[in-house]
Image (spheres, rainbow, N blue to C red):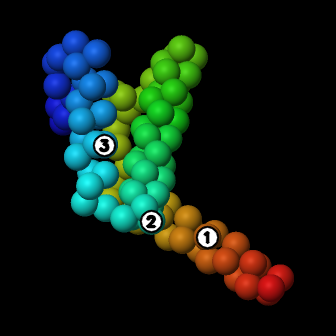
């Protein structure tokens, strides 16, 4: 996927400023806050993933050539994650 345009860094940064200013007029303060927090979360996920890939590459653990898990393996992993999150939610509910 090629979402990032091939433009100078200053132009790319300025485009974010323009989009931000365009969104200000159409959103309430609460909507702006919610959208801003969501965008920051997206940015944190991207930054964390990119950093971790850099660490793996530096350590020689780059797995870009490794075979992807099967759909069944992916589903099993996600089910374990959901179960772990549900357990945490239940623990929080018990402590309230």
Number of numbered discs on residues: 3
Answer with left or right where residue 13 lies relative to residue 62.
left
Q: Residue at x 27, y 25 (%)?
A: 14
Q: Mark 3 and mark 1: span between their CA atoms?
A: 34 Å
- Give the image quarter of residue 46: top left
Q: Which mark is residue 20?
A: 3
Residue under pointer 2: 30
Q: Secondary structure at mark 2?
A: helix
Q: Which of the 4 image quarters holds residue 80?
A: bottom right
CA distance separating discs 2 and 3:
15 Å
**Which residue is denoted by mark 1 in the rendering?**
85
Coordinates of residue 86 in the picture (x, y in percent): 62, 77
Secondary element at image label 1: helix
Q: Mark 2 or 3 closer to N-term?
A: 3
Crowding at dot 3, Cα within 10 Å, few <14 / some 14-19 / many 20+, comes out as few
The Cα atoms of the two marked residues, 1 and 2, are separated by 28 Å
Question: In front here: 18 or 79?
Answer: 18
Mark 1 or mark 2, earlier in chain: 2
Point 30% across, 43% down: residue: 20
């Amino acid at each position: 996927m090629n979402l990032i345009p091939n433009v100078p860094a200053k132009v790319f940064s300025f485009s974010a400023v323009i989009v931000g200013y365009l969104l200000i007029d159409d959103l309430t303060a609460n909507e702006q806050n919610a959208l801003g927090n969501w965008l920051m979360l997206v940015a944190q996920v991207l930054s964390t993933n990119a950093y971790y890939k850099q660490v793996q590459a530096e350590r020689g653990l780059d797995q870009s050539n490794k075979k992807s898990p099967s759909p069944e393996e992916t589903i099993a992993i996600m089910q374990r994650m959901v179960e772990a999150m549900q357990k945490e939610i239940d623990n929080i509910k018990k402590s309230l």
